[in-house]
Image (cartoon, rainbow, N blue to C red):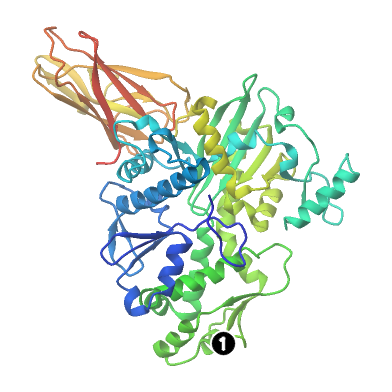
Amino acid sequence: MVEGGDPGVSNQKTPTTILLTPDRKFHSFGYAARDFYHDLDSTESKHWLYLEKFKMKLHTTANLSIDTELHAANGRRVKAIDIFAYALAFFKEQALKELSDQAGAEFDNADVRWVITVPAIWKMPAKQFMREAAYKGGLVPRDNPEQLIIALEPEAASIYCRKLRLHQMVDFGTKTTQNGFSPTENVGTGMTQAKEHVRSKRQSRTFLVENVIGELWSELEEGDRYVVVDCGGGTVDLTVHQIRLPEGHLKELYKASGGPYGSIGIDYEFEKLLCKIFGPDFIDQFKIKRPAAWVDLMIAFESRKRAAAPDRTNPLNINLPFSFIDYYKKFRGHSVEHALRKSNVDFVKWSSQGMLRMNPDAMNALFKPTIDHIIQHLTDLFEKPEVCDIKFLFLVGGFAESPLLQQAVQNMLQGRSRIIIPHDVGLTILKGAVLFGLDPGVIKVRRSPLTYGVGVLNRYVEGKHPPEKMLVKDGTRWCTDVFDTFIACDQSVALGETVKRSYTPAKPSQQVIVIHIYCSEKEVVSFISEPGVRKCGTLRLDVTGTESTAARREIQTHMQFGDTEIRAMAVDVATARSVKASIDFLSQ
């Protein structure tokens, strides 16, 4: 289900854009939202709420909560949860309609298992936020959480990549290239077809399709390791997996890493360039006063951005919307052409057809900060002892299509592992998510991204515990703030493996036990008061209705860390009755 792309930009993913009517009702999503908004008269458009690229907000907001707000193009604020719920509800309607059309009968939502993919480096609050939005948007009822799976994007890509047959991928030749193609053992007719295939796909010149039938599987042996680099719009996610035969289960070797180094970074650099030429005061004003024209300009940039390549020599022209030229003259009292002449930005000129003419170096410079971040991250990753002998590096996600990024990765690896890029690189995650939904147990071992634990009181031990942590209660000496570790950062944890702890209500009459969960990026934590330890969630045990005659009630809690989300279950030991347990990472 992909809606039509932009003219001039092939197989592009639907942009994360949404439009609400002036009274805050959902109107449209994706290209439909963008085009409708763009066609509104400027007197009207300022009342409509248009939001774009809002998915990243969940990663960048430090203390995300149900009340987190987003800014629409006209400066008005809306609740993020509403926007995400509207978007998910829209996807649900589209998918059910498509399924019903294909089946020739009404398709019931209760028969669908939904899979939402998120970057692996997203923290727990962001994953929980997605789940809350899905409940709010009506994807699944809150009392049937199993109907929705949160999948991690590079994992989905990994699952899909290991299913690939080699002829469905393009593989960077490891040997020296001749006329842009690498020599290969099984040349012949297959090779010529492969070359034609590559040309027809407009893939970067250095690609080669190996004409080998049979899954990549047959090349991967027990214990083989590979890295998945998922480069999207907002984030870059790196995951290291190892194959476990015979079933081909996957085991994560190193905790997911990455950062906000997606292709949006290039758009920001372009915006900075425009600020440098025309002044930030003008750009800020223009965005607010002519939001639809600003969107137009960014679309024009988007299609040129996709034309950037390492060996490009001819300039890239970017259409400046008429209202940009017009508004600039009103704002500054001189022309856009004049601004370009006196801006001393060497690489950008004004062309007589009313375009910004960027030479390829100027465009490549916009890519540089983002690509440098990615390469730095990869370099660091490859220096980790767990990350040696990597057989393949899969480059996936929308940004993986960029020849500039491909070349940078190739230069960094220097033949240490084979770079493989699936043909439909933008759809890799989507297809993998479907496979994951059919068999969520395929990833058997993950690594915990953080150290999790709770604060407890321990018996005070002279010489071991700091005196300032001592607390005397009923004649017994206790040490406060002790960090009881549930799981350590980067520790392997198998699917279904649980961490057990017992808790006792302070008073027999207590109805709810609330325990604060702390986390840290350090592997060894002794006290919750240490630097870098922060409160990240609460474990809530609802013990109402489980009253018992036992002298001392014990609630045994099982926490699961091996899945894409952290889960808790609890039991009252004396009565063996189940206790409602929930972990909340959103309301701090």
Q: Residue at x 31, y 36 (%)?
A: 141
Q: Position of residue 126 (x, y in %)?
A: 37, 43
Q: Position of residue 366 (x, y in %)?
A: 57, 65
Q: Please identify the quadrant where the C terminus is shown.
A: top left
Name the amino acid type tagged 1: Arg
Any part of residue 115 in sight? yes
The answer to whether residue 341 is above or below residue 528 is below
Q: Position of residue 360 (x, y in %)?
A: 67, 70
Say how many tags the image has. Answer: 1
Q: Is residue 78 left or right of residue 239?
A: left
Splitting the image into 4 quarters, where does residue 496 fall?
top left
Q: Is residue 378 left or right of residue 572?
A: right
Any part of residue 383 in sight? no
Farthest bottom residue in view: 333
Foreground: 584 or 552? 584
Q: Residue at x 45, y 76 (%)?
A: 293
Q: Residue at x 66, y 69 (%)?
A: 361
Assess disc 1: are there few (<14), some (14-19) or many (≥20) residues with their C-alpha within 10 Å of its C-alpha: some
Residue designated by label 1: 341
Dot 1: element: helix
Q: Residue at x 31, y 34 (%)?
A: 530
Splitting the image into 4 quarters, where does residue 341 fall?
bottom right
Q: Is residue 255 left or right of residue 83?
A: right
Q: Position of residue 136 (x, y in %)?
A: 30, 44
Farthest front residue in view: 104
